[in-house]
Amino acid sequence: MAGDRENREVALRQILFLVLLLAATPAQALSPAQVATVYDGAVVIDGTGAPPRPGMAIVVRDGRIQAVVPSGQWRALLGPADAKLAHVVDMHGRYALPGLIDTHVHLATDPDPPYERALLRRYVFSGVTTVRDMAGDTRVLADLARATLLHQLDGPDIYFAALMAGPQFFHDPRTVASAQGAVPGAVPWMQAITDDTDIALAVARAQGTGATALKVYADLPGSLVAKITAEAHRQHMLVWAHAAVFPARPSEVVDAGVDVVSHSCLLAYQASAAMPPQYHNRASVEEDRFTDGTAILDPLFADMKARGTILDATLYVYDVMWKVPGASPKPYCTLALAEKIAAAAHRAGVEISTGTDADTAWDKPLPSLFDEIELLVNKAGFTPLEAIRAATLVGARTVGREKEIGTLEAGKRANIVFLTKNPLDDIANLRSAELTLKDGQEFRRVKYQPITKDEAKAEQ
């Protein structure tokens, strides 16, 4: 009996000790799984294309969105105990959007890790939480992707491609730079493909680099594009392709079943009397076929819409090539035609994502994604709400992660950007990012350290 009493007294003392310890422990010292952060009072633009919802609270716990509810409801949702511990951030007068996505970057064509890390920092402090890298040195990209995923490096998540093309393409100096120390065309991240290639093995080798997708670039017939795509999908990889692969026409690329095609200009080759046989010897598109509009491309747009093929239009890169003095080379169609094709594709119901294919100069405060989004609104007929959806939900679909990112919904990763100005009044207000969350980790713009001359030495 005495032993039982002593055991009860010990147990009571242990319980009392735990109660006192919890009472003395500040909420911020508890683990993220125990404490919610509530971003209260924002106008939510959720990325789905739905109208904005004012006066909302976004509840974030353990790196994910637990709920998006009217401000007055979050306490009842959490319950009295959790609500008391919650960390509340006043977001009245702010606009909450999903983290933005650039669907066409090149971080490691000719790797320069200090500069790449600086670019990644600029992205995430500007509201960009995901990028899609469209071919480079995957040895470097895999390392950067791991570091940003694990929050060992400030930056967006990186999804990257392994490249496939015909053998003659690999004289391109960019492939030499991306395969330093090895032979371009003969490495898993840059493979030369012929009719004799073991396609299943080639896809498996590409997947072993950590790539999310294959990029089908150039100098392949439609039959090989179709074989590559079918095998990639069988091995659960996405396929991202140039909209014209030379000699494969845009219609052949789309009919092959690729998931995303890049560059609105390249779609113009669908109207060419004859396809150029090779990428490096291509003629410019036949612009005179578009003097009366883009109706000649309507069947192609209908096919893309039916298949769910996404267009990565990259208007910004054409804008740079044509408007920056001395820019070289000039593209194979005019900026005006690139914009006209993107606008027509949009009217036809083709999903368009926000890829740039080039970035702003190192000393600029923001990346080029904002320019691309503004071009879609100002030149391709998007409403601001449609452009935001393109930069969020559609972007998430290009990397196959729409169940995890791209909209502000319960259960999704807490990738969120808070703006001080309303982007629906003026799409340029996307540039007013005050706070970015990536998996719930905060990146406040006031703490952003601009890219330095030393970091950008190779770009000056």
Image: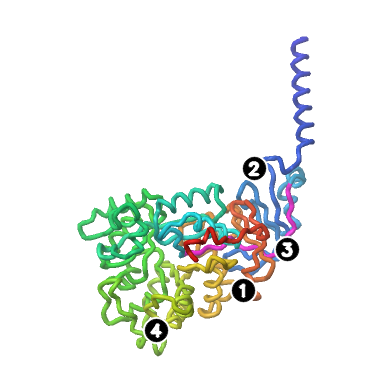
Q: Is residue 164 left or right of residue 372?
A: left
Decide: marks 1, 4 in contact (CB < 8 A)?
no
Secondary structure found at label 2 = loop
Residue corresponding to mark 1: 428
Q: Earlier in the sequence, mark 4 or mark 3?
A: 3
Picture quadrant where residue 92 is located: bottom right
Residue occupied by mark 2: 33
* Residue under label 3: 55
Residue identified by numbered label 4 = 295
Q: Residues within 10 Å of mark 4 (few under 14, many from 20)?
A: few
From which residue to which does the magenta span run?
Answer: 86-103
Residue type, numbered disc 2: Ala
Q: Is residue 344 visible?
A: no
Measured from the top left, where is residue 326 in percent x and y? 44, 78
- Mark closest to the chain's N terminus, 3 or 2: 2
Going 62% across and 55% down the picture, which residue do you hit?
Answer: 437
